[in-house]
């Protein structure tokens, strides 16, 4: 099926005969494979009598070599999957098999992409970036403090470089354009956080996606914002380089070295918000973050600090 896609990825018309000849199969076998492309990968294939088959637009598939070419200063091994449950689930399995970190897991699509608290990350084929980087962390808790915020900052900067100047942050680690979500980040940890552990840095970025009815909140993509189709290999290469620089700054200076820059990128500084913690809701105004990356809110005239993985921010009307 993917060999057929290799032939169609240029976005031009190909006759059933030419495709059959190239793959050494009959036209009816091509027809069956085209139907699989549609049903299994969700790709729309245009069929025009007398001309053949065509994808709605050209596709650039992911390639480990292409990604490495665009991040030549790094020697992270890259594993690319056509389809996987979740890049982070695969990364965790690889850690279990003893794969040496750092390494990167990428996929063309995820069948069970995940967000926080069991939520789903919509992950159609060949449109976006589904990225899990595995790091070995030896420095104890200090090396983990604020790490997910640092990743958000790196993703925001990669997006700004790739033609989305309005990309900004929402505490703790969403990347938005205005109120629309363009990227999500999920860190998972295995091992002893006080000693040696592995962190899986999961990142989903909407790159060329133009429609996704399953996403149940406002969202956008690089293509929708910039009007341009992006080569995801190039974008991942840049993300690798930017992320590596931020990780090094965080490793050597801790989160305080990055705190101010993070606040500059925070879209909701000074805004009236509700902080949702399970069934509880706390209304306040965002003051910023502290030296560990915890949220500082003014609540009823007092400053309060909040941290933890189960917290969500929502904007509320100014009082
Ligand atoms: P928070 O609790 O921080 O407000 P959230 O509701 O955005 O976060 P996450 O766990 O960060 O939740 O992300 C999962 C949610 O993101 C899903 O429940 C869905 O609403 C949305 N979502 C899923 N896929 C995508 C996508 N490809 N692009 C944008 N948003 C998505």
Image (cartoon, rainbow, N blue to C red):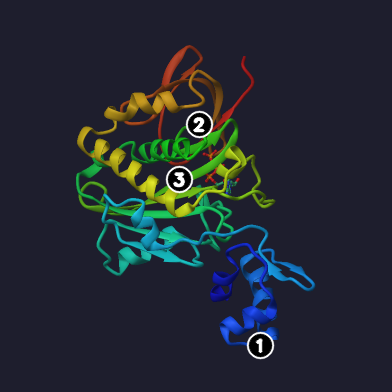
Residue 59, by quadrant, is: bottom right
Give the residue at x 54% y 48%: 207
* Quadrant (top left, top right, bottom left, bottom right) of the N terminus: bottom right
**Disc 2 packing (10 Å; few <14; some 14–19; many ≥20):** some
- The earlier-in-sequence mark between 2 and 3 is 2
Give the residue at x 70% y 70%: 53
Q: Nearer the viewer, mark 1 or mark 3?
A: 1
Instruction: Determine if the C-beta at disc 3 is less than 8 A from ligand 1.
Output: yes
Q: Mark number for residue 254?
A: none
In the picture as drawn, the residue positioned furthest to the top comes out as 301
Q: Mark number for residue 185?
A: 3
Question: Which quadrant of the render holds ligand 1?
Answer: top right
Query: What whole-number distance in Å separates the C-alpha atoms at marks 1 and 2?
Result: 49 Å
For mark 3, give the secondary structure.
Answer: strand
Instruction: Determine if the C-beta at disc 1 is less than 8 A from ligand 1.
Output: no
- The earlier-in-sequence mark between 1 and 2 is 1
Q: Nearer the viewer, mark 2 or mark 3?
A: 2
- Asked whether 301 or 13 is in front, the reply is 13
For mark 2, give the secondary structure.
Answer: loop
Left or right: where does residue 217 sit relative to residue 154?
right
* Callout 1 touching callout 2 (CB < 8 Å): no
Left or right: where does residue 70 sit relative to residue 129?
left
Query: What whole-number distance in Å separates the C-alpha atoms at marks 1 and 3?
Result: 45 Å
Instruction: Determine if the C-beta at disc 2 is less than 8 A from ligand 1.
Output: no
Query: What whole-number distance in Å separates the C-alpha atoms at marks 2 and 3?
Result: 19 Å
Give the residue at x 69% y 84%: 27
Q: Mark number for residue 165?
A: 2
Q: Mark number for residue 26?
A: 1
């Amino acid at each position: 099926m993917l060999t057929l896609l290799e032939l169609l990825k240029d976005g031009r018309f190909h006759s059933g005969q030419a495709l059959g000849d190239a793959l050494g199969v009959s036209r009816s076998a091509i027809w069956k494979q085209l139907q699989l492309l549609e049903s299994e990968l969700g790709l729309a294939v245009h069929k025009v009598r007398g001309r053949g088959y065509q994808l709605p637009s050209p596709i650039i598939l992911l390639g480990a070599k292409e990604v490495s070419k665009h991040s030549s200063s790094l020697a992270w091994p890259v594993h690319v999957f056509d389809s996987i449950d979740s890049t982070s689930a695969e990364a965790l399995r690889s850690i279990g098999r003893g794969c040496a970190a750092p390494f990167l897991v990428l996929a063309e699509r995820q069948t069970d992409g995940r967000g926080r608290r069991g939520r789903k990350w919509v992950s159609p084929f060949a449109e976006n970036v589904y990225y899990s980087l595995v790091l070995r962390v030896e420095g104890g808790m200090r090396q983990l403090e604020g790490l997910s915020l640092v990743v958000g900052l790196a993703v925001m900067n990669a997006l700004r470089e790739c033609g989305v100047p309005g990309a900004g942050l929402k505490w703790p680690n969403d990347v938005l354009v205005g109120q629309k979500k363009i990227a999500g980040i999920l860190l998972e940890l295995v091992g002893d956080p006080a000693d040696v552990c592995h962190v899986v840095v999961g990142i989903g970025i909407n790159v060329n996606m133009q429609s996704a009815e399953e996403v149940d909140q406002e969202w956008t993509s690089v293509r929708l914002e910039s009007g341009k189709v992006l080569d995801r290999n190039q974008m991942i290469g840049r993300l690798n380089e930017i992320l590596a620089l931020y990780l090094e700054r965080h490793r050597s200076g801790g989160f305080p070295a990055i705190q101010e820059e993070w606040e500059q990128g925070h879209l909701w500084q000074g805004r009236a918000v509700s902080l949702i913690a399970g069934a509880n809701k706390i209304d306040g105004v965002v003051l910023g973050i502290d030296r560990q990356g915890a949220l500082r809110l003014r609540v009823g005239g007092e400053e309060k600090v909040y941290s933890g993985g189960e917290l969500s921010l929502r904007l509320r009307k100014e009082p």
